[in-house]
Image (cartoon, rainbow, N blue to C red):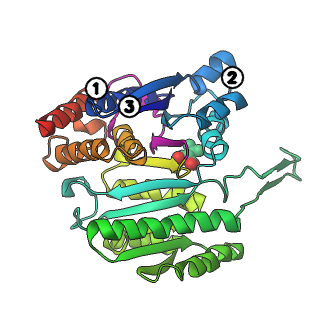
Amino acid sequence: MKTYNIGVIGGDGIGPDVVAEGLKVLRAVKDGGFDCNFVEYPYSGAYYLKTKELVPDRVIEEWRGLDAVLLGAIGHPDVEVGLVERSVILGLRFGLDLYINLRPIKLYAEALCPIKGKGPDDIDFTVIRENTEGEYTQIGGILKKGTADEVATSTSIYTRVGVERATRYGFELARARAVQSNRPGHLTMVDKANAIRPQEIWTRTFAEVGKEYPDIKQDHAYVDAFTMLMIQQPERYDTVVTTNLYGDIITDLGSTLQGGIGLAASGNLHPGKASMFEPIHGSAPDIAGQNVACPLGAIMAVSMMMDYLGEKTAAKRIEDSVAFLLSSGQIKSADARSGIGTTQMGDMVVEQIQLSAG
Ligand code: IPM
Ligand code: MG
């Protein structure tokens, strides 16, 4: 039987609460088909406060040898802003060269959508966020800090290799989605090359790689217009590729289209290699440990992880069960207002998986 080695980082705040439910669902779905060996890692803001330890290089090396990593959330109010996030989240993304951040935006029930008149047929697109370049490379700093002469710089990096591999992944995904949905393929590239001219590398690469994909409809939007259009006419979009920062921003906005950040999941991928899966929400320390956080983002991250590992049936059983609980109204919202506790919601997904198997 195939055994997957999966690193588990609960992290801070509600991270451990929701990861526990993700693992519960994973245990329910694996019956007989495959096995998992979980390796837990303590890295988090809370752990840093206790030990002053961030992620050491040898652990990054160890992660490269796993099949996948499941992450809850990182962020602690008493730790310097961004310190542990950079060590753990960006440590994984950069250390494992996870150059694709895949963020599906899919509405499972009309009642979850805050936009009048939009239903599941209108909201089903996937954002590919380039994940190792752009504004996130940490190139820059502050000179003469706190003085009248203070200077702050932050350099955005776009390499041909980085832009091309993200773009190519976008075209391939658009093609795969077209086959699956029996609709024409469509890839939209989002940038801000009118104001930030070096982003013209995105425009040019998109056009060049696009010649290899004549079957895919190709268009472009500036990120400011895109934020407006994805709310007004989300049905226009199918597959979207964009820079690291724009992808960060538009997927938080996108998560509200599908019912809230509590539901949104992501895969940080290096196709063919160890990859990392996480809900896109943060650590929400104010509601940690109270059994109120919505675990659906983490559960859907587990579904994405199993899909990535090739366990398509397990992945689909999880997704279908979550979709059913939402569309049938058994789960009415993806936040604390659902009135359903974290562990109860995990149990409901497990039960639904068992029902659908029987
Ligand atoms: C995300 C988060 C991270 C990011 C933060 C926590 C560093 O917002 O995964 O979207 O900016 O990428
Ligand atoms: Mg974000």
Q: As shown in the figure, which amino acid type bears the numbered disc 2? A: Glu
Q: Quadrant of residue 257?
A: bottom left
In the picture of the structure, the residue carrying the numbered disc 1 is 343
Label 1 Cα neighbours within 10 Å, binned few <14 / some 14-19 / many ≥20: some
Report the residue marked by disc 2.
53
Furthest toward the front, the residue is: 1
Q: Nearer the viewer, residue 266 or 233?
A: 266
Instruction: Looking at the picture, tell me which residue is in the foreground, 34 or 180.
Output: 34
Which secondary structure class fits the magenta region best? loop
**Farthest residue toward the left?**
358
- Horizontal placement of 128 versus 92: left or right? left
Residue at position x 51%, y 73% in the image: 189
Taking the image as drawn, is residue 242 in sight?
Answer: no
Q: Quadrant of the N terminus?
A: top left
Residue 104: tell me if it is visible: yes
Q: Residue at x 48, y 31 (%)?
A: 6
Mark 2 surroundings within 10 Å by alpha-carbon count, few (fewer than 14), some (14 through 19), many (20 or more):
some
The mark found on residue 319 in the picture is: none
Q: Secondary structure at mark 3?
A: helix
Could you give the CA–CA distance between mark 2 and mark 1, rounded to whole angstroms?
30 Å
- For badge 1, the amino acid type reads Thr
Q: CA distance from mark 2 to mark 3?
A: 24 Å
Residue 197 in the image, given as x and y percentages of width and height:
70, 77
Q: Is residue 218 above or below residue 257?
A: below
Q: Residue at x 71, y 61 (%)?
A: 156
Q: Which residue is mark 3?
A: 18
Task: Identify the element where label 2 is drawn.
Answer: loop
Q: Earlier in the sequence, mark 2 or mark 1?
A: 2
Q: Is residue 289 above or below residue 99?
A: above
Residue 93, horizontal then vertical, whole percent? 61, 45
Q: What range is drawn magenta here?
A: 273-296
